Amino acid sequence: MNEINKFYFITVNYNNHKITIDFIKNVLSLSAPVSSEKQIIVVDNASSVDDVKSLDSYCKSLEDVVLIKSDSNLGYFKGLNRGLDFIKNKDKAFFIICNNDIIFDSSFLINLNELLFEDEVFIISPNIITKDGKQQNPLVVNEVDKLQKIKARIFFINYYLALFLRFSYSLVKPILESKPRKTNDYPQMKIKRGIGACYVLTPNFIKFFNRLDDRVFMWGEEALLSHQIETVGGVTLYVPSLLVHHLESATVSAMPTKQRYNITKRSYKIYKHYW
């Protein structure tokens, strides 16, 4: 058992306060080790007046919840960094940074507290499962395969080619999804990177970094984070016993298609160097 006595949960909200409130309720309900503390930090990314008002009204009634209001939409990692910046004493703590559309298993904190890991472990990636049963971790075990890199290079040539590729995929998607969903049986192991929906930053991360590499607005954060810790010899540990359910992003799905493509293309130009 480790000496952690504080658990910080940091998430971002953008025009979906109901999802964020469900997230807060779930975190507050989690069983926690004796004598430990939980704090939830929500960074609002310049949501509508009504959305912020509803979220603010809920958060004000809760002692262990802090709402930080940004004047502009910072994106994912920049928003999380605002939450990290808010925490002044980072000693003996885990930092669970994640989307707001996450539901933690009731034993998440108990299992996390009992976890033993080496000093080289900077990031813990949990076992993230989508509504349709897909396991999203490990995202990359060793290296991103060459075919995936080629696909991304073609996809980001231009928007209309991307539309054609998406349409082509939509034709075969029903066939692919009709097959039984396979689950992986990866044990606890070091991996190249986990999916960005949820990470646990360990005290070893905080020894070297106070913030995340936030050069992309959205998408590609996984590549930047794995590169960030690798520069100082850090690794990511996949832990299948840390169970998380991912409802999958309402924020992203609400964004206009062309806007989403342009954002991902700008991110790709940065993160492709760290694949």
Image (spheres, helix red, strand yellow):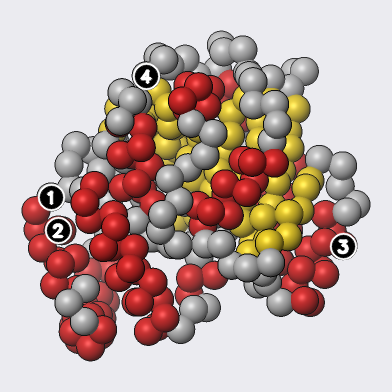
Q: Which residue is drawn at 75% across and 18% down?
A: 34
Rounded to the nearest whole Å, what is the CA distance between mark 2 and mark 4? 28 Å
* Residue that carries the numbered disc 1 in the rendered image: 145
Tell me which numbered mark, 3 or 4, is placed earlier along the sequence: 3
Tell me which numbered mark, 2 or 4, is placed earlier along the sequence: 4
Q: Look at the numbered discs 2 and 4 and tell me whether their residues touch, using CB distance below 8 Å.
A: no
| Residue type, mark 4 in image | Glu
* Residue that carries the numbered disc 2 in the rendered image: 149
Q: Residues within 10 Å of mark 3 (few under 14, many from 20)?
A: few
Q: Look at the numbered discs 1 and 2 and tell me whether their residues touch, using CB distance below 8 Å.
A: yes
Q: Residues within 10 Å of mark 4 (few under 14, many from 20)?
A: some
Q: Residue at x 56, y 62 (%)?
A: 74
| Residue type, mark 3 in image | Ser
- Residue at disc 4, secondary structure: loop
Rounded to the nearest whole Å, what is the CA distance between mark 3 and mark 4? 41 Å
| Residue type, mark 2 in image | Lys
Asked whether residue 174 appears in the rendered view, the answer is yes
Image quadrant where residue 226 sits: top left
- Residue at disc 2, secondary structure: helix
Tell me which numbered mark, 3 or 2, is placed earlier along the sequence: 3
Q: How crowded is mark 2: few (under 14 residues within 10 Å), some or many (20 or more)?
A: few
Q: Which residue lies furthest to the right in this view?
A: 61
The relative height of residue 48 versus residue 209 in the rendered view (above or below) is below
Quadrant including the N terminus:
top right
* Residue that carries the numbered disc 3 in the rendered image: 57
* Residue that carries the numbered disc 4 in the rendered image: 120
Tell me which numbered mark, 3 or 1, is placed earlier along the sequence: 3
| Residue type, mark 1 in image | Asp
Rounded to the nearest whole Å, what is the CA distance between mark 3 and mark 2? 45 Å
Tell me which numbered mark, 1 or 4, is placed earlier along the sequence: 4
Rounded to the nearest whole Å, what is the CA distance between mark 1 and mark 4? 25 Å
